[in-house]
Image (spheres, helix red, strand yellow):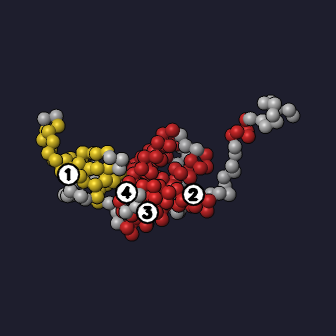
Amino acid sequence: MFNVGDKIVYPMHGAGVIDSIEEKDILGEKQSYYILKMPGEVKVMVPTAKAEEVGVRNIIDKSSADAVINVLEQDETEMDKNWNKRYRENMDKMKSGDIYEIADVVRNLSFKQKEKGLSTGEKKMLNNAKQILVSELVLAEHASQDEIEQLIETKINTSFMMFRSEEVKPQSIVNKFIPFDGTGTENN
């Protein structure tokens, strides 16, 4: 059982602080709910009776936060080439609520985005995974959202340069399709 003021993680939503515990009558059923205050002034109601079942847990401590940040500094783990299978595997990692798995998703999809771009679904997943990661690290590190977002970007950029920079050949789509001879047409 959690108490008011506890910092907890609700899988697939992120971390927040228990603002209150209230009895609510929803669809004729009276239940006790944790009222979780999430980043951005969002409030989420989690049934107290099902909290453990849905994977609600305490946030990580400072040393675990350092280990999570270390995940971002590593090379990507092997992912399936098939985007559909890769998407399902990443979704399973996110549903687990394991912060290390979520950091793995953030790093891997960030690398993939830098290498060749992501599908719309994977872009959405990356943004969601980043939000979940940031929400927990903000509470664990006692830092601002901007500081944590910058830290994540820096770690990913550094590890990408270390492990992948030579493999990626920058291409400018603008140079590829628009000639720069001043006429608007190619004169070969």
Residue 157 — which label?
2
- Going by the numbered disc 1, the residue's amino acid type is Ser
Query: Quick one: quadrant of the C terminus?
Result: top right
Q: What residue type is labelled 3?
A: Val
Quadrant of res 140: bottom left
**Do the CB atoms of the residues marked 4 and 1 lie less than 8 Å apart?**
no
Category of crowding for the residue at label 4, using alpha-carbon neighbours closer than 10 angstroms: few (below 14), some (14–19), many (at least 20): many
Residue type marked 4 = Glu
Compared to residue 66, the image places residue 12 above or below, namely: above
> Gap in Å between the C-alphas at discs 2 and 3?
16 Å
Mark 3 is surrounded, within 10 Å at the Cα level, by few (under 14), some (14 to 19) or many (20 or more) other residues, namely many
Q: What element carries label 1?
A: strand
- CA gap between label 3 and label 1 equals 29 Å
Front tag of 1 and 2:
1
Residue hosting label 4: 136
Which residue does the numbered mark 3 point to in the structure image? 68
Helix, strand or loop at mark 3: helix
User: Residue 26 at x, y = what percent?
Assistant: 17, 37
At mark 2, the secondary structure is helix
Mark 1, residue position: 20
Instruction: Tell me which numbered mark, 4 or 1, is placed earlier along the sequence.
Output: 1
Would residue 11 be visible to someone looking at this image?
no
Q: In which quarter of the image is residue 61?
A: bottom left
